[in-house]
Image: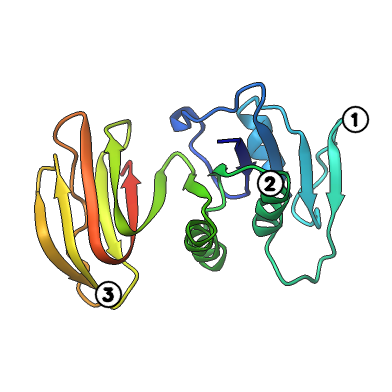
Amino acid sequence: MMKAFIYGGGTILTENITEHPAKDDLVIAADSGYLNARALGERVDVLIGDLDSLGSASVPDGIELIQLECEKDCTDTQAALEIAIERGYDDIVIIGGLGTRLDHSLSSMGILADMKARGIHCYITNGYNRIRYLENDSLLVPKTGYKYLSLLALDKICKGVSAEGCKYPLKNAKITRNNQFAVSNEIDGNVALVSVRKGAMLVIESRD
């Protein structure tokens, strides 16, 4: 798999970002995500966006710049994803993209469903949370610096939900969008196995 890193805006907890691009990975900053990449000491290969939230930051020579119109039918993060996919990358980490703008946060989380449907492996982290999308599938979640593990139903009903290796194990449970009870679980050992037989969920690791 070819891996790309996309840095979005929003507040990040830099000391808890453990994902860092390797030499051959593609690194894209979506508008003010450039500031987050810079705060983490990462290089940027491509800067894309309408640059409305970049402020007075100067962009060094050597970075490919793709300027978008202010009025457009996608977010800067979505545009960055399209660039990565067009260039053949099928394993994408989004860093940032979550913050005080709830609409932008929800939009970023909605991206995960689109990536899954297109066969792209993708997750989002800002150091406070790490978010994955799970649909009719299973997922291994290693224990890291995140304390809590929550499963949130996106479909009206999620059936056959299991969480093994957790403080509060689930086995063949049913979680509904109106009764989100699988929140603030904790991983007991080194890894948890989360699965859902039918339905779509967000698997969210949280620090606090």
Of the residues tagged 2 and 3, which is closer to the observer? 2
The type of residue carrying mark 1 is Asp
Mark 1 closeness class: few <14, some 14–19, many ≥20 residues within 10 Å: few
Image position, residue 51 (x, y; %): 80, 53
Image position, residue 43 (x, y; %): 71, 27
Q: Are marks 2 and 3 in contact (CB under 8 Å)?
A: no
Measure the alpha-carbon separation of dots 1 and 2: 21 Å
| Left or right of residue 19, residue 83 in this image | right
Q: Are marks 3 and 1 in contact (CB under 8 Å)?
A: no
Residue underneath mark 3: 177
The type of residue carrying mark 2 is Ala
Query: The N terminus is located in which quarter?
Result: top right
Q: Indicate the quadrant where residue 175 lies.
A: bottom left
Residue underneath mark 2: 84
Q: Callout 3: helix, strand or loop? A: loop
Q: Earlier in the sequence, mark 2 or mark 3?
A: 2
- Above/below status of 88 relative to 197: above
Query: The C terminus is located in which quarter?
Result: top left
Residue at (41, 50) in percent of width and height: 131
Residue at (19, 73) in percent of width and height: 179
Image position, residue 105 (x, y; %): 51, 60
